[in-house]
Amino acid sequence: MSTRVRIGESIDGFTIEDLLHKGGNGYLYRVKAPSGRDPGFPLLMKVPGVGRGEPTLGVVSFEMEQAILPQLTGPHVPRVVAVGDDPMRPYLVMEEIVGEGLAAIVGRAPLPVEDVVQTGAALADAVHDIHRQHVIHLDLKPENCILRANGEAVLLDFGFARHARLPDLLAEEEAFAAGSAAYVSPEQIQGNRSDARSDVFALGVLLYELATGKPPFGEPATYAGMRDRLWRLPLPPRFLLPAIPPWLQEVILHCLEANAVRRAPSAAHVAFDLRNPSHVKLTQRSEWTNNAGLARQMRSWWRSRGSKAAPGARHAVTANAPVILIAVDTEHPDDERHPALQRATAAIVAMHAEYRLILVSAIRAAPLGEGTRVEDTASGRHLEHRNRLRAWIAPLRLPLSRVSLHVVESADPAGTILNLASANHVDLIILGAPAPGERKLAWWRSVASEVTAGASCSVHVVRVPQRAGTAQEDER
Amino acid sequence: MRVALLSDIHANLEAFEACLAHARERGAGAYALLGDFVGYGADAVAVVDTAMRLAGSGAVVLKGNHDAAIERADSYFNDDARAALDWARTTLSDDQKRFLAALPLTVERAPAMFVHASADRPSRWDYVDSATAALRCVQASGTTYTFCGHVHDQQLYFATQRGRMSLFTPVPGTPVPVRGPRQWLAIVGSVGQPRDRNPAAAYAIFDDAKHEVTFFRVPYDHRTAAAKIRAAGLPGSLAYRVEAGI
């Protein structure tokens, strides 16, 4: 069979205009939609390479992409317009993404820190978005990412991807080389294709390259060379470029932990860290500025001994590592809802081995003209409410590295909470129901109702039961 | 066209009707009943009647090992199963017995083959319970799709480039793209006696235009089905199995 496509030919109404790219994963043609079916954006047709001299794996890869890409939605993947179902002539017609390829951006690296952050966070957003849709990419590299003009990242080429709810056609293919040598995670090298943190590792490689201009593990050509990353520590980015701040090195090396359990638990956590440097908990990782000495390499090697691929069990793609936002009213510290909110937080946190807590206090804007007392100045007020947040969470005895505190001046607390939630990929918002005194207001005017209605995640509304005895006590 | 694939109904009318209604709501335009209409349950007569009616309107209807045992008692079955078959034999009409006896073991409608147990020597009632058994089955059918029952759990096998079969346990309700020329073998699960500790009835729908197969679990009134088994004087363990899904 031959799937070779000729320029000018029409396939199911799509006219082939020119060959854009020929690669290991097939041929990309620019095509024109049939009249009356123009989707309003430029189109590409992808066709697998079949025949003499083409890799047989290309066909399986194509099949995988044909199964997975149409299931994905949102701005971080190309939209699929048509799927060619004739097994003798398979194709995929999709949106041509207009933007700058990540390869070109990496070509300019090392980038200034703020550009690393912007591009890195956009990539992390995109990766988290496909993870939420049960898909692990498993082949993230500069050639497979494009940045749109609005800054959003788009991921391409799902030929090596894994969908948690679909059969993995690549799992048992012997000829299968896992991902691309420079970006592949240690567990992928060991044959595990079902850990979303493999994409976090690749994200770490991309961040490293953006920040330093060099790939952390080189581009090994042999399997043994690839296996090195099971234990060998990359050069600390600050060794290559001392101007890189310790917090960024911390974020990058956290992604590059060989053992997935020690790695940043999800792309959402990476995005949060990149956007909130002051909340990044610095560990020893941030301090390394020289090539790992013998002792450190030995420790790393020792830890990696006997590590083998985790069983490729079916599990939810997004790790059980939620980002939880808690709205705390620090302006009313005596409110009886606080203990209930703390109990709810403790109970929910107890269900998760990994999590990130974002505590938010939305305070009223400072009065015009700062007062003379410290607590009346804007910075003084921020500090005061930050301390109240810290005191609020302290009794729960949670590791501080998992908790971040935000004091935001806002006349619109619900809007502030919703914005923070969507910008940080929050999975759950916990907040109090209106107090009994506020119930005279319509429910729909409360912060809780506005947040519940507007949130794109789950919302846990904590209510303190009204004591039935109150009225009777008065009578007695 | 969407084809509803139902197997191992086992005289469980409540489960059968729940799955047929579920499939109708999802636009099923054709039915394939992969055998084992009788045995275990208390409603052999009503279930066979429904099968005969569907056969009359063009459905694929196959013979299962329990159906075959109606015409010829078999030492193959355990005591409980045999008790249910003996009972079914006394309640079914001659017409119904003739219908069951005349059912085919396999039906091929390109690009699919339908069979109760394995397409490899179907009358041996071998279980497709391993990658090796799945390979024997698809080698015998030779078709892109093979749909079978007999094993009560829902499973999807697919051929790899290396000529082996790989197993995937489907997620109910999630359509799975199944494109040729790769060979696929779907075991659709049991309508009347699921055995994975979930009493919900199991079946699947194949969409031959979209090349998708979707496995479903359908909760139904399993307490009534169990009560009928007890009322018929059949072994209590059979009622319990329906209640607990074991």
Image: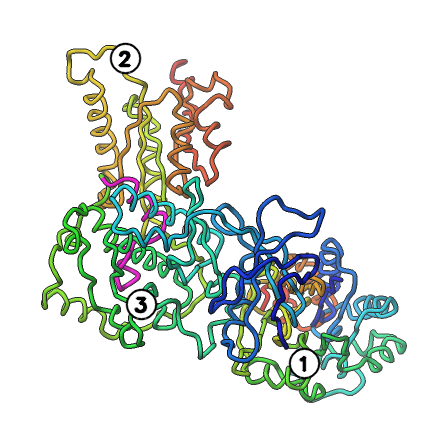
Which of the two marks, 1 or 2, is nearer to us in this view?
A: 2
Q: Residues within 10 Å of mark 3 (few under 14, many from 20)?
A: many
The answer to whether residue A28 of the structure is visible from this angle is yes
Q: Which residue is mark 2?
A: A367
Task: Measuring from the top left, give residue A132's x and y in whole percent.
Answer: 46, 51
User: What secondary structure is found at the residue carrying circle 3?
Assistant: helix
Near-viewer residue (A110 or A202): A110
> Would you place residue A81 above or below residue B100 in this image?
above
Q: Are marks 3 and 2 on the same chain?
A: yes
Relative image position of residue A464 (x, y in whole percent): 40, 29
Q: Is residue A265 magenta?
A: yes
- Residue located farthest toward the right when viewing the structure as drawn: B95
Numbered-mark total: 3
Image coordinates of residue A381 in percent, x first then y, are 22, 21
Amino acid type, label 3: Pro
Tell me the subunit letter for badge 1: B
Q: Residues within 10 Å of mark 1 (few under 14, many from 20)?
A: many
In which quadrant of the rendered view does residue A66 lie?
A: bottom right
As drawn, A83 above or below A169: above
Local secondary structure at mark 1? loop
Could you give the CA–CA distance between mark 1 and mark 3, rounded to whole angstroms? 42 Å
- Residue A18 lies in quadrant: bottom right
Residue A255, magenta (yes or no): yes
Residue assigned mark 1: B117
Residue bounds of the magenta highlight: A254-277
Q: Which mark is residue A186?
A: 3
Q: Quadrant of the C terminus of chain A?
A: top left
Residue at point 25% right, 53% down? A252
Does label 3 or label 2 sit earlier along the sequence?
Answer: 3
